[in-house]
Image (cartoon, grey):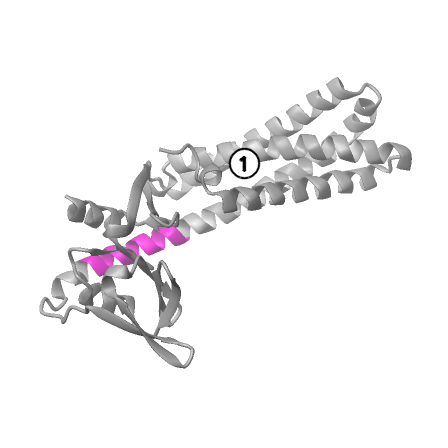
Amino acid sequence: MDFNPILRNKTTLSGYIVAVIVYAMIYSFTIALAAGYPHSFSISYILYDTITVAVVIGITGILIWSVTRYGILQTQIGAYKVFFITLITLFCVIVVNGIESVTMWIVSAEIFPLFAKTIPIRIFIVLLSFSALSLFYLQVNNLQEKEEAQEKAEAIREVSSPQNATIEENISVREGSKIKIIPVGEIEYIRADGDYVSITTAEGHWLKEQTMKYYEEHLPQNKFVRIHRSYIINISFLSRIERYGQQQSLTMRSGEHIRVSAGGYRLLKSKLG
């Protein structure tokens, strides 16, 4: 099992590195302006500070991601989540500013006295940044809980689904002015996309004006599994399943990573035997 999804996915990792570097540059430049450093000094200061902040924030962010995934926040009450996130935020403030201070003291005795004057504003900025990220995380977590509740309600309604639905062998989609016929065996997964569904094969993606419920009922039950409100996968194209506490994700042969709901995980396990 891979240690962290950020490190596993090259696209996600590249975006994460760019975001961290941009944040570090803005952070260092803003403090340099606020502190009113001489121009000759500010260039070297910004360089040292940007490198230090980027490394510290980057590593801390990956560790936090891992901790929150293994922390199983979705199974805890709201007060525990707030307490847990508050502790992480305070920890980040101490670690980030502590490592910054030690690094600047080691790098240059000339830089450190001026650096020390900016410690209060640094603490404020880091605290504000991680507090905003924590609120965002809690919001996302609450949305995931609502999705899980909806999925459980849908699972209960499945008992009333028609058992004699016609099983599709091919699906027709528009390709410009032409009609393309896709054998269902070539479909890797189907994803909800607003009022449409996106059908994915090795050749590309196509939009179809149908519902996820329709394909859940009309695709071969021994090959297709609805693992999430927004995803139906063809288990023939499944590469691996990963579990982090109460959260699951899977990887398709194409390298696509898809989150799995708790109900979808149980259903998938029953299909795989």
Question: Which is nearer the eye, 188 or 232?
Answer: 188
Q: Which amino acid does label 1 sit on?
A: Gly
Residue 101 counted in the magenta span: no
Q: Based on the displayed image, in which of its 4 quarters is residue 133 positioned?
A: top right
Q: In which quarter of the image is residue 223?
A: bottom left
Residue 226 appears at what percent x and percent y?
A: 25, 57
Rendered position, 188 above or below 131: below
Which of the 4 quarters of the picture holds residue 123?
Answer: top right
Find residue 46 and report its horizontal and vertical position in percent.
Answer: 78, 35
Image position of 45 (left or right of 192): right
Quarter of the image with the C terminus in it? top left
Residue range in magenta is 143-155
- Relative side of 18 to 193, left or right: right
Which residue is at a point 82% across and 41% down the rendered structure image? 33
Residue at coordinates 62% horizontally, 31% vertically from top-left? 55
Q: Is residue 18 left or right of residue 33?
A: left
Q: Residue at x 60, y 27 (%)?
A: 95
Is 147 one of the magenta-colored residues?
yes
Q: Which is nearer the eye, 152 or 61?
A: 61
Most extreme residue toward the left is 164
Residue occupied by mark 1: 61
State the image coordinates of residue 118 (x, y, percent, origin top left).
77, 32
User: Can see residue 158?
Assistant: yes
